[in-house]
Image: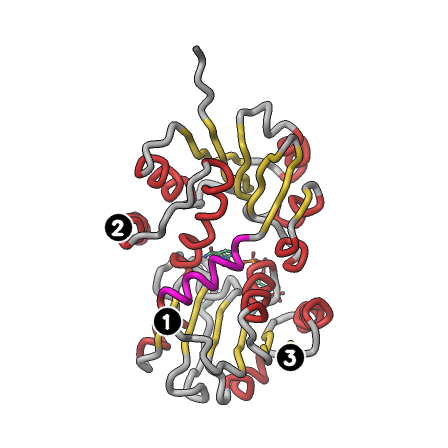
Amino acid sequence: MTMTIRAACIMGWPVRQSRSPLIHRYWLKQHGLMGDYRREAVRPEDFPDFLARLAQRGYAGGNVTIPHKEVALRLSEPDERALAVGAANTLWLENGKLKSTNTDVEGFIGALDEAAPGWDDGLQKAVVIGAGGAARAVVFGLIERGVPRIHVVNRTLPRAEALRERFGPGIVPTSFDDLPGALEGAGLVANATSLGMEGYPDLEIDLSPMRADAVAADAIYLPLETSLLRAARARRMRTSDGLGMLLHQAGRGFELWFGVRPEVTSELRARIEAELLREQN
Ligand code: NAP
């Protein structure tokens, strides 16, 4: 008798920076499942063909990272969430059809719920910095949780204006010059740019105009403590980091490929955190 091992992968270019294999292999082992999760470095020009042969390659589906998220949306049957965000990060084969969703939304919101329970109680105003794929997922999650006014701050203002077109009048496109005014009385600030990531300039920000009980969130997990989170902790604000987002976005894909909904435990987090810190030092 032959046994088929189910497998999934992370597709990106480059892809070696991805920590997703650590997470999914941990869960496979924890649940005693025969399966594998691999890195696949796929050049943009090869991506359509790679997707067309996903089943032939032995994959039940996979995750998609930079620069493939928008193309993955076009080449699959997206659910409402992926369509609303305009990017897909999770793919799976269902009755021979390639389906997709965007789990960065639940990643961001799940991490916030864990790190700062009640963060959305009476939240009237939030500030999201960035207007790319991650920012669209963050904004969509905030709208789903009922935040009525969201300032989208971006270097290239027309990209922030495009979010207002996409998500409606609750979005206020804002330039970096107007960031201090946007932070005035806000209860949440989220960084969804590359600013603060290794190799990029820091996000310089004065959080003093924010509410005393405000929360700060960052999508970046390399480094684990970004300049935004450092500034927030100095003011005793609650924080949610990019590793929390990465862990919480992963569960849905695992469930779709391997049939079990895994948990984000403190042990899993500690393992990945140790790995990241080892690489940083
Ligand atoms: P993206 O679509 O390329 O968007 C990049 C964003 O960063 C844009 O708003 C861009 O502004 C801004 N930016 C880049 N360099 C800048 C600079 N020097 N000065 C000012 N703004 C700058 O990328 P993305 O997919 O949204 O990813 C954004 C970040 O989120 C990345 O750091 C990524 O690693 C992280 N992320 C984390 C997770 C997680 O699970 N933790 C998931 C997804 C993404 P312009 O529009 O002006 O270019």
Q: In the image, what residue type sits under mark 1?
A: Ala
User: Which residue bears the numbered disc 1?
Assistant: 116
Q: CA distance from mark 1 to mark 2?
A: 19 Å
**Side of 90 where 36 appears, left or right:** left
Q: Main secondary structure of the magenta part?
A: helix
User: Which residue bears the numbered disc 2?
Assistant: 267
Does residue 279 appear in this view? no
Residue lying at 66% horizontally and 56% vertically, measured from the top left: 86
Q: Residues within 10 Å of mark 3 (few under 14, many from 20)?
A: some
Counting labels gives 3
User: Which residue bears the numbered disc 3?
Assistant: 172
> Quick check: is 29 in the magenta stretch?
no
**Side of 44 where 33 appears, left or right:** left
Residue 75, compared with residue 60, is above or below; it is below
**Side of 8 where 113 appears, left or right:** left
- Residue extending farthest to the top is 1
Does residue 261 appear in this view? yes
First of labels 1, 3 by sequence position: 1
Q: Which residues are magenta?
A: 103-114
Q: CA distance from mark 1 to mark 3?
A: 25 Å
First of labels 1, 2 by sequence position: 1
Q: In the image, what residue type sits under mark 2?
A: Glu
